Image (cartoon, grey):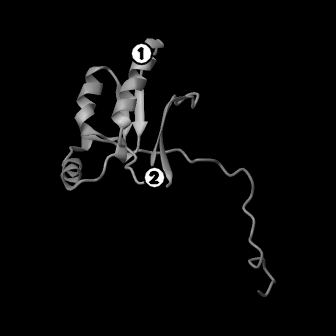
Amino acid sequence: MGLSSLVVSLANTAEPLYLVNRRGSRPSGEGAAERFDQAIELCRKAGFRRILLRGDTDFTQTAHLDRWDGQGVEFLFGIDALPKLVRQAENLPEKGWKRLVRPPKYEIRTQPRQRPGERQGTDR
């Protein structure tokens, strides 16, 4: 039996707050809302003023989003491109969104090199 771990951690230090080992066949978001609630409470007690929850699409549990928002908790989750959401996005006014421009992951600081066999005068 394989395990699938659910880890809730602090982003700035990677310090684990909660770790739950589950069977490998369980959905990744299963039980996440309960652990998020515990982490929110723990962080509030520790004096954190700003809390941001992050996760992939499996952590977007709409039943909890309004409650977290009402508590002043921010969240950044992926969401599946469901047909209804795609239609809503396509119908947004031009001023309702802007293109996300990501900086390059790294800058190449050397001159590009040719691969072996690409050099002039070689027959490969």
Q: Are marks 1 and 2 in contact (CB under 8 Å)?
A: no
Q: Which residue is mark 1?
A: 44
Residue 94: where, in percent of width, then height?
A: 25, 44
Instruction: Judge by depth and name the residue closer to the eye, 80 or 63.
Output: 63
Q: Which residue is mark 2?
A: 24
* Quarter of the picture holding the C terminus: bottom right
Instruction: For label 2, count other residues whose C-alpha is less than 10 Å away and answer few (under 14), some (14-19) or many (20+).
Output: few
Q: Report the side of 52 relative to 94 (left or right).
A: right
Query: Which badge, 1 or 2, is on the more N-terminal residue?
Result: 2
Instruction: Judge by depth and name the residue closer to the eye, 5 or 14.
Output: 5
Residue 6: where, in percent of width, then height?
A: 46, 40
Q: Outermost residue, front direction? A: 1
Q: Report the side of 85 relative to 17 (left or right).
A: left
Q: Amino acid at mark 1?
A: Arg
Q: Amino acid at mark 2?
A: Gly
Residue 122: where, in percent of width, then height?
A: 81, 84
